[in-house]
Image (cartoon, grey):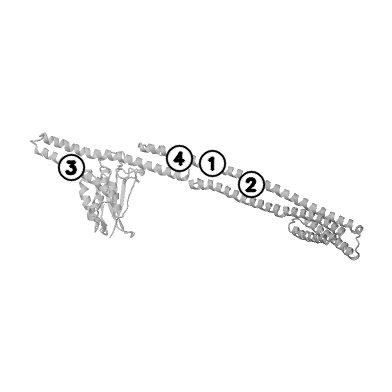
Amino acid sequence: MQLTIFKRLSLGYGVFVILLIGLGVYVAVQLNRLNQLTWAVVMRDGETVRLAESLDSMAVSLARFEKKHLVTGDAAFFARFQEIRTRFLSSQLTMQNHLESDALRAILDDIGTLSTAYFALIDRERERMLGDGRRQPDIYHDRKAEVLDQIRLSLQTIMGEARQARDQKILRSSHISVTVIRVGIITIGIGGLIGLFVSFINARRINHAIQRLQLKTHDVANSRFSTLPPIESPPEIAALTRDFNRMCDRLQELNDMKEDFIYHVSHELRTPLTAIREASSMLLEGCFRERPDSQDQLLTIVKDECDRLIKSINRMLDLSRMEAQMMDYAFKAIAILPVVRSCILKLAPIAVAKEILLELTPNDALPKVHVDPDRLYQLLENLLGNALKFTEAGGKVCIALQPDIDNTGFLQVQISDTGCGIPQNALKTIFDKFRRIDSGQETERGTGLGLSIAKHIVMAHGGKIWATSQPGNGSVFCFTLPVV
């Protein structure tokens, strides 16, 4: 399936846009992961390490102030011990919210149990010292040292795990950053290649087709109207090529029609002008001065040729006015049969001279028609004149009038002859101006305007005109007129 230029561009740039959107979504997702990892490093792992280090430092301070209090009995040292103790327990609770794994939470729970045991030993030793005023270090010293060592060891374990988790998250963040950069570069590269490929293919095909059209346009400008062969191109350019070929065909037809017109008009005008010139010259030279009947014949020739010139010019003027839709029509309701008979009577001498039977099939039940009588007469004269012109001696021309049988609102006139007929390929153009189908036989001169004028007259009345024919078996011309 050939894609249009719009679809080609939309598809190419759509793929590029989809790639950019996909890249944007991917980068957004990865940035969100980086944000989560950064938050976890700072707010969880980093805070866990800081709290563990703080608890370890506080454990050392607890042991130091506890020893100072037991040695000196100073209450200030014990107050300081209690302050650190409170902070130690609070930090344990804070750390509980920052640990991610259940294993670390279990270690923290063990630290809580050990710290409770440690503080219980301190409280018992202080109670005994306050009770009898004597210290017994051998009873609690080793146990306190052991518990404190276990607490610090557990804190070191938490710090190690937290640091390891932090380092792993930092490595993952670095890997994500590198991956995002690579994916971005690859995506932009692929998108750029797709854009270049689509642009190259579209530009190449469009430019190739336009160049051929440009060359052919130059040929048309030089009156060479050959058509373009099919071009592999988008549908718009293909449609333009088809229209261009139709234009070339039409221009060729117009050029042929122009040449035919020049030939026929020059022939149509030259012959009567030549006859008028020769007859005038003979009269001026005094030929046949003593033979008045011959002079009258020369004057008759001049008059007939002048009438022929005027008729030819009037036909061309009529066609020009009809094509410009400037022809005036005087429509009225009339009976068509008298007009047909009048036209037959005018052309009867031609039929008699050529020994052609001119037959009218009368029909008294014909309705009136809404026409311009003068233009109807001109229409019948053109069609009957053509039928007589192309019918050989001994032939037959028939005129048939058919009433409005099917209630279509139109009456049909049919003129048939037994002449040479019209080739099938010429039936579509027979009503074009300057078209003369001679069928290879010698015909009277004419401009080829009669059938074109007939078509314009029928169409101005709202009817239709057509022709059917078989070469060698005559032709049939039909037209319709609106009834009243």
Amino acid bearing label 1: Leu
Indicate the quadrant containing the C terminus: top left, top right, bottom left or bottom right. bottom left
Q: Specify the label residue 196 is tagged with.
A: 1
Q: Nearer the viewer, residue 408 or 235?
A: 235
Q: Nearer the viewer, residue 476 or 353?
A: 476
CA separation in Å, label 1 and label 4: 20 Å
The answer to whether the residue labelled 1 contacts the one labelled 3, judged by CB atoms less than 8 Å apart, is no
The residue carrying pointer 3 sits among few (fewer than 14), some (14 to 19) or many (20 or more) residues within 10 Å by Cα, namely some
Task: From the image, tell me which residue sits under label 3.
Answer: 306
Of the numbered discs 3 and 2, the one sitting upstream in the chain is 2
Q: Specify the label residue 355 is tagged with.
A: none
Amino acid bearing label 4: Ala
The answer to whether the residue labelled 2 contacts the one labelled 1, judged by CB atoms less than 8 Å apart, is no
Of the numbered discs 2 and 1, the one sitting upstream in the chain is 2
Mark 2 or 1, closer to the camera? 2
**Can the viewer see residue 314 in this picture?**
yes
